[in-house]
Amino acid sequence: MRWIGARGPLDRGDLDPDAACRATQAAAMTTLGARLLRQPGAMVGLGLLGLVVVPALAAPWLPLADPTLTMPAQRMLPVGSTGHPLGTDALGRDLLARLIWGARSSITVGVVATLVAALIGSLIGILAGFFGRVTDALLMRGVDVLMAFPYLLLALAIVAALGPGLGNAMLAIAAANVPFFARAVRGAVLGIRHQDYIDAARLAGHREWWIVIVEVLPNLIPTVLLLMTTTLGWMVLETAGLSFLGLGAQPPDADLGAMLGTGREFLTTYPRVAVLPGFVILILVVGINLFGDALRDLLDPRLRDRGRRLGPRRDDRRRDDRHTREEEHRRGGHHRRDAFEEERGDERHQGEQNADRTETDATEPANDSASATGSRPPLIAAKGLSVLVPSEGGAAAAVDRLDLQLRAGERVGMVGESGSGKSLTALALLGFAPPGGRLEGRVELDGVDLLPVDADALRDLRGRRIAYIPQAPSDALDPLLRVGYQLREAIQAHTSETSVNTGSGVGEERAAERASTQEGSGGRSEADPVQKAAVMVGLGDSRRNQSGADTSKRIETLLKKVGLDGVADIQRRFPHELSGGQSQRVAIAMALAHEPDLLIADEATTALDVTVQAEILALLERLSRGRDRSLLFVSHDLALVAGLCDRVLVLYAGRVVEDAPRERLLEKPAHPYTAALLACSPELGRPDKPLPAIPGQPPSPAESTWGAVAAGCRFAPRCPKAQPVCEQGEPALDELASGHRVRCLFPENDDARAEESR
């Protein structure tokens, strides 16, 4: 049996798991090495290290003079003397030989001390972090005692007790750095031991030592490597420091620190005797640090893009713009609020009519069809939205020129594989860019572009107009605060002096607020987006005027709305005392604190079991009805999206490849990628249905540079219908039928065009 992969046919016999694992590891190491060599800092560091390390390693085979041989008759020979290229020292010893052998000695002691400290410290950290309890308490109290002493003083005390010598100095330096490794490794192990694969290994009956060796140690290797690269430079300096004080290498042995110590007496008369060993130490330590920093940036994704931002962040630009607009806001802010209140007063009768609507009414079916929502103006629209992330070749688009519209009351699902850009798109609608990246394009809320908006106004928009439900409730809940306090904080964080204090009044305000804003921006005025955003949120000078009783009533209303009013003492519980479903409901309640117009649920049911998933979906469906609230539901599961949403967007490699009403997408998927997603989704009642996997892997954002013309369809390497023309240019997102758009030259149901024409 054969499968057609992204790069050609694959035979079942070729799919050896061990061989595939080894090939993957080799490819990863090759990629890491190639990326490391492309780092300027790594190349400079390697060059500096090569100047010192290569001669030091080759010292036994180089034609050098004896570094310990004293010849008083040839003392202080100048540079360029016969047989002594760098001259001699005060005892007539060859400086070049002593520098090379001294560098060899310093490097050896530094490397050995680093290995000893890493071995002992890692062992202590693993035992303390993995076994915990008494073991953790005893070991870490001992580490705390060592850390109570400055490490240099501790090293001096150990050398004083053991006696001077290079070996004793090495032991002293290693012992002084053991606490550093122990605490860092213990912290890493504490995060590893609660992972699911550790629990699975225990359930499989494996012993603790087996779990530590097979499961824990491999995951600690990057951490320990990073610690060693950042520590090695300090070890070399500490070795040189002890030798400088006469506690390390003893005469006549060559060592950079000892040479620096003896040469300081001739600093004014023969400066090269002291300057040369100091210069070698400088080159060695700087080279180690540069190479270590480059390796750390590659191994640690949190630091990888730290120094490679894609230009100024929009938050920075907002902060700069804020200073130029501050005076204008002070002069015109109150007039804008008064005008906004007058407009909202004209709409108050509509809000009073809506006040009679109860939460029970909200559960009744609403007119949420495409025909009902299609005539409404867009609530939020993304136009040419790109999320740019740093890459080796420049700015790469993780989300590329995406267009999206959500109307009031519309429920839209967004599906795709991991890495397709779903969560990045959801966060971009809130104005958030990934670390080191930036946003391009427009995100319009009621016609106002949010990306250049001032940070304070945007923060209020996120709380009052747009709300976000994260995938994991732990991202929204503080483990140290009670549920009631966190709900109160969410309510008060965006409460202005114009906000009403009852639960239903907030929704009335949102309707009037949206109506007045759409009326004011209907002509696409080019007014200052900061001013327009300030009008939308109704910024006030006093922002937390709700009384305690009103806030408590609002909290009770929110808990009732999400079905937690029957849980005893729910407000006094901590997040760890809640089940997964209860935690997600609390996160939803926090998002609903101000009755937002748009609710973004980013895989809000992924971590829940099937029963709780159904409850959360029913809750989201109920909450998205009745108040013209829009819902953007992000998920991997097409079945969940089909049961909740009216329209579905399919994303692939940061691009929308299909946009269709739910029923049409399920019955007649047009894009081959959508058809493949449906084909590999299980169906209830069809246990024998084959679930074919989509061959190949989606392209990485780093494979294309933002702004460059696409070479062809991004799905073509994995598409069973790909033709040569598919690689000549990226297809446009064309309309296949009414409300159905697809980015494909050869759609699955091409007969739809004929049906539409007839």
Image: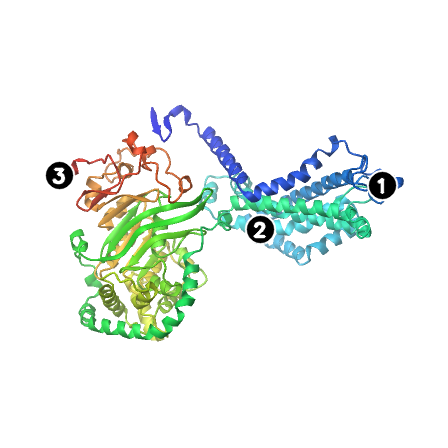
Residue 210 seen in the figure: no
Disc sitting over residue 755 in the figure:
3
In the image, 524 versus 61, the foreground residue is 524
**Disc 1 vs disc 3: Cβ atoms closer than 8 Å?**
no
Secondary structure beneath dot 2 equals helix
x, y percent for residue 384: 31, 50
Q: Residues within 10 Å of mark 3 (few under 14, many from 20)?
A: few
Which dot, 3 or 2, sits closer to the camera? 3
Secondary structure beneath dot 1 equals loop
Residue under circle 2?
A: 184
In the depicted structure, whether residue 736 falls above or below residue 412: above
In the image: residue 26, left or right of residue 76: left
Tell me the CA gap for discs 1 and 2: 47 Å
In the depicted structure, whether residue 534 falls above or below residue 230: below
In the image, 572 versus 443, the foreground residue is 443
Which dot, 1 or 3, sits closer to the camera? 1
Q: Amino acid at mark 2?
A: Ala
Disc sitting over residue 92 in the figure:
1
Tell me the CA gap for discs 3 and 2: 66 Å
Secondary structure beneath dot 3 equals helix
The image quadrant that residue 516 belongs to is bottom left
x, y percent for residue 559: 31, 64
In the image, 119 versus 70, the foreground residue is 70
